[in-house]
Image: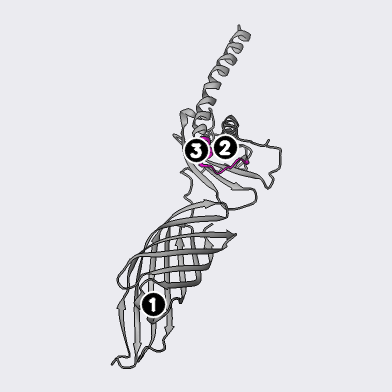
């Protein structure tokens, strides 16, 4: 009987639909668990949105719905889609890219109205765990609807751009060698030009000049060098804490009127540890850093650096 066949088909679809949704929710549950365990939410509510504004994007909507359910299951407050984000709401944006054998999704967490990414993660979902029909194929032959069909771009999400900073600041060198300190003084004021890549690799070009008195024919000292450090960053909203090892490679020039060339230089390299904090508002920020030389070829330093920087690629 047609009615009984239709009823049995509906029942079969319902029975199969739940496992399919469960498979997708299980994949998204791993993503939700990573977000919760990261601590980026800090007890705040999070709105989940589909990064593709196209209302026909059923895949993105299905993923956003599944992630909302997973977060609610993890006791995370998720406002209704009709609620407007507040200053206390974080926004989790999902960007899905379907492919022939599945879909890749990138999740990015931001504060409402803030471009800074607080947390991000990529995930891959195979086609067998996706809702039926979510991987749209080419239009059927003979489509004369008059609507131009633009094929969906195939490929994994584009990697985020390189994030780097350029800075200029003041750097104080406090010598550790008592003999050198008795000649050059307790503090040497320097200029520092720096760059930071991904908040991990730090490079500084440093220079200072010291006029001397009471040192016979020795008139002044000049220093020029480069400092490189590799640090581990901890991002806390607009602040970034970091620490790690580094090296300093430089030369000190002694300017003496009795020398044939007027000056002589000697190397002064060192191995140091650095720690600091960065604060940023938009593309501008401040960087306060402390360094300590564990070893040096002549004199080590305590260093304090305060710089202003401009951020690119954020």
Say the numbered circle drawn on residue 181. Answer: 1
Relative horizontal placement of residue 209, taking residue 42 as reference (left or right): left
Is residue 266 positioned above or below 64 on the image? below
Identify the residue at horizontal 52%, vertical 22% (top origin): 19
Say the numbered circle drawn on residue 30. Answer: none
> Which residue appears farthest toward the right when viewing the image?
83
Q: CA distance from mark 2 to mark 1?
A: 64 Å
Q: Earlier in the sequence, mark 3 or mark 1?
A: 3
Foreground tag (2 vs 1)? 1
Query: Any magenta on residue 36?
Result: yes
Which is more toward the observer, 314 or 141? 314
Task: For label 1, count other residues whose C-alpha is less than 10 Å away and answer few (under 14), some (14-19) or many (20+).
Answer: some
* Residue that label 2 marks: 60
Identify the residue at horizontal 52%, vertical 52% (top origin): 235
Image quarter of the C terminus = bottom right
User: Residue 171 in the image: x percent, y percent?
Assistant: 47, 72
Foreground tag (2 vs 3)? 3
* Residue that label 3 marks: 34
Q: Are marks 2 and 1 in contact (CB under 8 Å)?
A: no
Numbered range of the magenta stretch: 32-44
Relative horizontal placement of residue 215, taking residue 150 as reference (left or right): left
Which is more toward the observer, 147 or 55? 55
Task: For label 3, count other residues whose C-alpha is less than 10 Å away and answer few (under 14), some (14-19) or many (20+).
Answer: some
Identify the residue at horizontal 58%, vertical 11% (top origin): 8
Q: CA distance from mark 3 to mark 1?
A: 51 Å
């Amino acid at each position: 009987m047609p009615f009984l066949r239709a009823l049995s088909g509906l029942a079969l679809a319902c029975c199969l639909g739940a496992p399919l949704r469960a498979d997708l929710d299980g994949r998204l549950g791993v993503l939700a668990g990573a977000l919760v365990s990261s601590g980026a939410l800090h007890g705040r509510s999070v709105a989940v949105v589909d990064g593709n504004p196209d209302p026909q994007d059923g895949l993105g909507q299905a993923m956003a719905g599944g992630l909302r359910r997973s977060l609610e299951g993890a006791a995370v407050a998720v406002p209704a889609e009709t609620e407007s984000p507040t200053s206390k709401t974080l926004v989790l944006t999902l960007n899905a890219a379907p492919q022939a054998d599945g879909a890749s999704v990138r999740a990015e967490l931001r504060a409402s109205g803030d471009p800074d990414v607080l947390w991000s993660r990529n995930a891959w979902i195979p086609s067998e765990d996706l809702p039926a029909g979510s991987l749209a194929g080419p239009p059927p032959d003979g489509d004369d609807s008059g609507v131009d069909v633009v094929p969906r771009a195939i490929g994994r999400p584009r990697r985020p751009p390189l994030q780097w900073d350029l800075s200029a600041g003041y750097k104080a060198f406090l010598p550790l060698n008592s003999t050198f300190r008795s000649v050059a003084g307790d503090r040497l004021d320097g200029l520092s030009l720096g760059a930071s890549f991904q908040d991990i690799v730090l490079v500084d070009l440093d220079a200072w000049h010291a006029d001397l008195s009471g040192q016979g024919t020795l008139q002044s000292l000049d220093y020029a060098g480069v400092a490189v450090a590799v640090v581990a960053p901890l991002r806390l909203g607009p602040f970034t804490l970091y620490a790690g090892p580094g090296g300093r490679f430089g030369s000190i020039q002694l300017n003496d009127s009795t020398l044939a060339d007027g000056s002589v230089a000697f190397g002064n390299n060192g191995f140091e540890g650095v720690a600091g904090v960065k604060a940023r508002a938009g593309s501008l920020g401040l960087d306060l850093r402390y360094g300590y030389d564990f070893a040096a070829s002549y004199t080590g330093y305590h260093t304090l650096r305060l710089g202003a920087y401009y951020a690119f690629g954020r």
